[in-house]
Image (cartoon, rainbow, N blue to C red):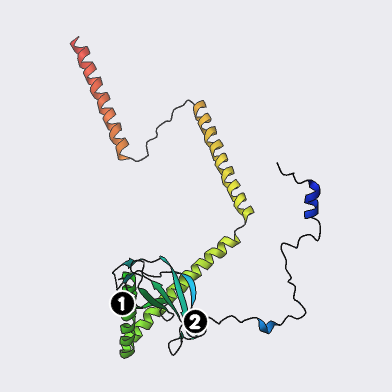
Amino acid sequence: GRPPRRGTAHRRERTAPGAMGERKVTNKYYPPDFDPSIIPKRDNWRAPGKQIKIRFMLPMSIQCQTCGEYMYRGKKFNARKEDCYGPDGDYLGIRIYRFYIRCVSCCAEVCMRTDPKNSDYVVERGASRNFEPWKQESELNKKIAEIRKETDENDTMATLETRTKESKREMEILDALQEIQDQNNRSAKVDTADIIAEREARVREAEEKAIKDELAQVEFKQKGGYVKRLEPSGSSDSEARRKRRAQNSIFAKTKRENEEGKD
């Protein structure tokens, strides 16, 4: 038949204090006869020849020398890591590490190590590094800088010119910095109240000007709405017009007298 259901009394018995141990224990029980020397010690992975497994991401694009497979930068591998020992084990106190990965196609082993001197990695065996234009450009810039330095050391005039150019550039940089500092100081000294007062004064001045213009228009309309044109005194143009009017009036008078005589 059907088994009987467990009641609440049974659940209370199971959850009663002392019936079950703590779930999140912070302290552990050590018996009186505990001997820590019996516990086996863990091997030191930094010892020569010891390796650990890590998750490794390719820092550059490489090509496998066994099968020709291309593996690009950013690809992840389960790699083995070890410390380098010997005369080339460190650079200026910086530890050098070696990594071992396997090709994704033929499982051939690829070995590479860190290069603290150039802040880069070096492929030791199993693969070849792909061509990188930026690296070639940086190397070319280094060579140019070395050649220029040697030339300056051998040539006194070239050294003097280089120092002059550097000092001029430094002076320009200092002037630019001083200008920026002055501008920042001016901005820091600006008071918000002064800016608001200046703006209100400009608005008030514009309103007064608008009122004056409107009053002038009203006064102009009250006077008749026209402007009498005044000729400048002593102008040759006004004298010519006056003579032309006199001639026209004389001609008109003569013509009118002739017409009357005919009648």
Judged left or right of residue 230, residue 248 is: left
State the residue at coordinates (57%, 43%).
203
Q: Residues within 10 Å of mark 1 (few under 14, many from 20)?
A: few
State the residue at coordinates (44%, 72%).
79
* Residue hosting label 1: 140
Disc 1 marks which amino acid? Leu
- Mark 1 to mark 2 CA distance (whole Å): 39 Å
The quadrant in which residue 103 appears is: bottom left
Quarter of the figure with the C terminus: top left
Residue 126 vs 188, above or below: the answer is below
Disc 2 marks which amino acid? Lys
Helix, strand or loop status at disc 2: loop
Task: Tell which of 242 and 216 is nearer to you.
Answer: 216
* Residue hosting label 2: 50
Going by the picture, which residue comes out furthest to the left?
262
* Residue 88 x/y as whole percent: 43, 87
Residue 6 vs 175, above or below: the answer is above
* Residue 230 x/y as whole percent: 40, 34
* Residue 174 x/y as whole percent: 47, 73
Going by the picture, which residue comes out furthest to the front?
1
Q: Which circle, 1 or 2, is nearer the viewer?
A: 2
The quadrant in which residue 164 appears is: bottom left
Quarter of the figure with the N terminus: top right
The quadrant in which residue 29 appears is: bottom right
Q: Residues within 10 Å of mark 2 (few under 14, many from 20)?
A: few
Task: Tell which of 134 and 222 is nearer to you.
Answer: 134
**Which of marks 2 and 1 precedes in the sequence?**
2
